[in-house]
Structure formats: C-alpha cells, structure tokens
Image (cartoon, rainbow, N blue to C red):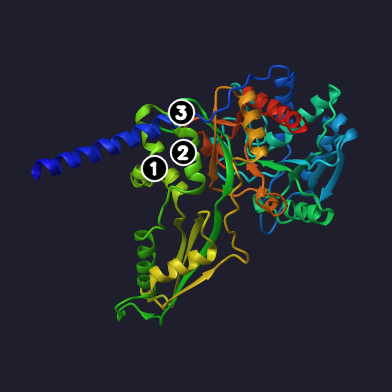
C-alpha cells in the first residue's frame, strides 16, 4: 500500500511538472516582427526648440479659486498658429469650452470613422519653495544635457507639440489621410477636464461622431523596472482605475480632558482607520494585469516564463509578490490611502468631532458603490459617518480590447518606431481625459513613447521635469507613423 501511494504521488508530481512544461513551451512571444520605419525626416533639433518655446507659456491649471490664466492660454494658441502654418491652413480648428482645441483633418474617405489623437497643454503649478531645486528654471524650456527641461516637457506638451510636428511634416510632404484625423487638446486636464474633454465629447455626441480609435497619454516606455524583462516595456493603457474619496466623521460630546470617556472621537476614528488598513481589498490576477503578464511573460527567462504561463497554479504567489511594493500592489487591487485627518484644537479639550479622508483607486470590476459597501462592513461602527466627498465619483473605465484592430495598428506603429521595445497592455493607475471618450468608442488606448528609467517617473508633477531630445524625436515620428498607418 505504501509503495502504491508513493507511486501515485510521484505520478501526480510528474503529471504536474509535465503540464507546467507543456504550458511553458507553448507560452510563445506575442510580439510582431516588422521592419522599423526610416523615412520620416522630422528635424529633431528644430522640434525640440519648438517644445522649448511651448514650455515658456505658463499655461497653469491652478484650481480653485483661480483655475487658469487666460492670457497665457491665448498666447499659447497664437504660438501654435504661428509655428505650424500649414496645419492651421489645412485643418479646421475649433475652440471648445473656452480654451481647449479641436482640430479636424478631413480624410479622402469620409465613410471611415476618424482617429482621435489627444493631449493637453495645461500644466500643474510648481510647488512653492521648490524652484531652487530645479536644475533649470521650471518655465525656461532650457535645452541642456540632451534634454528639454521644464513644466510640461513630459506632461503633456510633448504630446501636443509632437502631434503638431508630425502633422506639419506630413503636410509638407503632400500627405492626405484617407481617414479623418482629429486632435483633441485639452486646457484643463489637470482639473479633471470639465470644460475641455467633457465638452468635446458632448460635441461628438451632438454631431454623431463615433471614432474608430482614441489615443491619449497614460502609457509609456519603461526601462529596467520590470524584474526579468530585459527589453524596455511599452505599456499601452487599456483601462483606468476609478477614483473616490470618502470622509469618515465621528461626532461625540466634547468636554474637559480631565474626565475622558472610554473612547474619544479621535480614538473611534483611529480604530476605524486601523480596520481599513488591516483589511485591504482582495487582489487578483485578472483583467488588465493578467493581459499584461500574458504579453510580457514570454519575453522573460525560463523560470519566470513558467510562472506566468501557469498562473492557474502560481497566481496566488505572484499576487503576494506584487502586493509587496506600492507600485505593483496598485495593479492587482483597489487601494486604500488615508490622506487627511483633523480633530482637536487644544491639548486639554476633548474634540466634539474628528474627521479623516480616505482615497480609493478602484480596480475594474468594482464600483464606488461596492467600495462604500465594503468599507462600511469593515468599519462596522454606527458612530462613524461615511460620505463621498465628490459629487460624481469616478468608476473604472471600460477595458478596451487588445484583440481589436485599432490595438493591432497601434502595436505595429510602436514596433516600427521603437524596435527595441516589447509591447503589452496595462492598467493606468491615474486618470486621463480619454476616459470621457469611452462614451463614443470602445477603442480607447493610452500611450505615448516617452522613455523613463528607474526613478524618473517621479518628475511628472515633480521637480526637474524633462524630455530627452532624442526621445522627443521618437515621439514626433510615432505620431507621423500612427497617422499614416491609420490612414492606409
């Protein structure tokens, strides 16, 4: 009996190993083989000078109470018109919502659905007191050390200027698109796009425009930050996480600290916060995260490839590993972040009220309502009032199909312009204006070939924001080839 049991266990182990090996050997590369393009003659140095000049317009979204500086935005409009005369002579330009720009390049076959290329030219302010930390003044547009420096160099004037450079070059070479090309450039993306992207989408609905595809910022090329993956990873965003913040408020009788109750308002609130942090949302290798590892797993060494080829077995292990770092933890679950807390005015006074704000970035498959239901159950204390601080919480965007034809065209374009990369989908952790366009097309993808090495992503909204001149040339060529590919 013992020998038979051992033989059975060995047989099962061999069977398991066989299944793992079989699935690993069939876990082949999904990258397309295609020759790089070499005929796009955009002058990179001239383009960099144009980006430099664009940065010098302080098109800042300040938020309440002073959202924007009108003069800077109008001056930026004039700069685009003067710098790209062929584009403004050939394309129809409309101002939407005050300062956003919608360009239409009518194609020769108006029965084809248009391609929409997005960007935004508003920027966030520079944090007061950090100006001296910049290698070059934040609105100087300095070209130094092989890069263009300044607020907006990467987020997101490189997209706007890159698309304009591509269009001007194509027009200079007599190109006419078969498919209509539209450019949607927002002026208030950093404020959530209320007067820009949302009103442009409303215009699309009114005119019954249903794009074939929308391409926006959100994904980029990441160097050396994905363990086991040697080539740079071109991450194409196929969905965005949702966003909601809930206030937790506790009201209790105040009084003198010499006669405290068993729990003060702050104590009750602290216990609720501790419960939330001790009970994170469940993770999972599903949706965009599963699609991402399905694309990048075959490019890794054999051991890692075996793991990602067999997530049915190793999925929980991978999930635990990803949960160990904040950047990767956010890929596999709805995140919980306590961001604000207040209560009390004096050391010997019991506060009558304590309040905290907790921000949640919502994974596709969940909603702000399901988040509220879960945290209410976890806290399980009627003394804690839970309320959304947003009028309209943002649920996750729909997930765009990686097998759709527009994704394949985008993938082809990336490989043609950046042949050293491997391409795969991923989940965008922040928010972009493109989420509004999910109302008019299912094909919304978020990618620009900005290259970032380890630690450089922090410069977005931070200090020393910059774009390498050589990389900006790639961005310009990417838009030119994207237009050509969608027009063919």
As drawn, 463 above or below 143 = below
At x 31% / y 80%, what residue is drawn? 261
* Element at label 2: helix
As drawn, 300 above or below 321 = above
* Element at label 1: helix
* Element at label 3: helix
Crowd around label 3: few <14 · some 14–19 · many ≥20 (10 Å)? many
The x and y percentages for residue 122 are: 70, 45
| Relative side of 48 to 318, left or right | right
The x and y percentages for residue 249 are: 46, 72
The x and y percentages for residue 15 are: 28, 37
Q: Residue furthest left?
A: 2
- Between 265 and 178, the residue placed more toward the observer is 178
The x and y percentages for residue 2 are: 9, 44
Residue position for label 3: 299
Q: Which mark is residue 311?
A: 1
As drawn, 383 above or below 78 = below
Residue position for label 2: 293
At x 13% / y 42%, what residue is drawn? 4
| Relative side of 275 to 362, left or right | left
């Amino acid at each position: 009996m013992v020998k038979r049991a051992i033989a059975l266990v060995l047989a099962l182990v061999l069977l398991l190993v066989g299944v793992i090996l079989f699935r690993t050997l069939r876990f082949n590369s999904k990258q397309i083989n295609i020759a790089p393009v070499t005929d796009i003659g955009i002058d990179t140095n001239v383009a960099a000078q144009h980006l430099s000049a664009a940065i010098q317009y302080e098109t800042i979204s300040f938020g309440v109470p002073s959202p924007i500086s009108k003069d800077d935005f109008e001056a930026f409009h004039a700069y685009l018109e003067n710098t790209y005369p062929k584009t403004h002579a050939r394309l129809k330009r409309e101002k939407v919502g005050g300062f956003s720009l919608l360009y239409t390049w009518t194609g020769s076959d108006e029965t084809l659905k248009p391609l929409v290329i997005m960007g935004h030219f508003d920027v966030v302010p520079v944090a007061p007191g950090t100006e001296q930390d910049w290698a070059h003044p934040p609105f100087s547009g300095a070209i130094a050390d092989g890069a263009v420096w300044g607020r907006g160099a990467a987020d997101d004037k490189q997209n706007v200027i890159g698309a304009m450079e591509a269009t001007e070059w194509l027009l200079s070479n007599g190109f006419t698109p078969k498919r209509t090309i539209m450019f949607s450039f927002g002026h208030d993306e950093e404020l959530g796009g209320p007067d820009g992207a949302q009103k442009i989408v409303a215009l699309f609905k009114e005119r019954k425009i249903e794009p074939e595809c929308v391409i926006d910022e959100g994904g980029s090329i990441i160097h050396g930050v994905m363990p086991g993956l040697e080539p740079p990873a071109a991450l194409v965003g196929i969905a965005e996480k949702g966003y909601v913040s809930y206030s937790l408020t506790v009201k209790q009788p105040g009084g003198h600290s010499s006669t405290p109750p068993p729990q003060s308002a702050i104590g009750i609130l602290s216990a609720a916060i501790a419960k939330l942090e001790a009970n994170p949302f469940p993770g999972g290798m599903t949706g965009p995260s599963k699609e991402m590892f399905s694309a990048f797993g075959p490019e890794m060494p054999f051991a890692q490839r075996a793991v990602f080829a067999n997530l049915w077995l190793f999925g929980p292990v991978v999930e635990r590993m990803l949960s160990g770092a904040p950047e990767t933890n956010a890929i596999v679950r709805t995140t919980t972040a306590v961001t604000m807390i207040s209560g009390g005015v004096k050391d010997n006074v019991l506060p009558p009220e304590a309040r905290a704000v907790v921000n949640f970035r919502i994974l596709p498959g969940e909603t702000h309502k399901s988040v509220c239901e879960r945290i209410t159950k976890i806290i399980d204390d009627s003394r804690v009032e839970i309320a959304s601080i947003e009028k309209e919480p943002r649920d996750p965007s729909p997930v765009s199909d990686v097998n759709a034809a527009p994704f394949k065209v985008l993938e082809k374009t990336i490989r043609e312009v950046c042949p050293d990369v491997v391409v795969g989908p991923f989940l965008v952790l922040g928010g972009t204006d493109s989420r509004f366009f999910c109302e008019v097309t299912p094909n919304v993808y978020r990618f620009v070939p900005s290259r970032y090495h380890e630690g450089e992503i922090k410069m977005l909204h931070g200090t020393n924001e910059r774009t390498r001149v050589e990389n900006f040339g790639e961005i310009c060529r990417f838009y030119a080839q994207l237009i050509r590919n969608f027009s063919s």
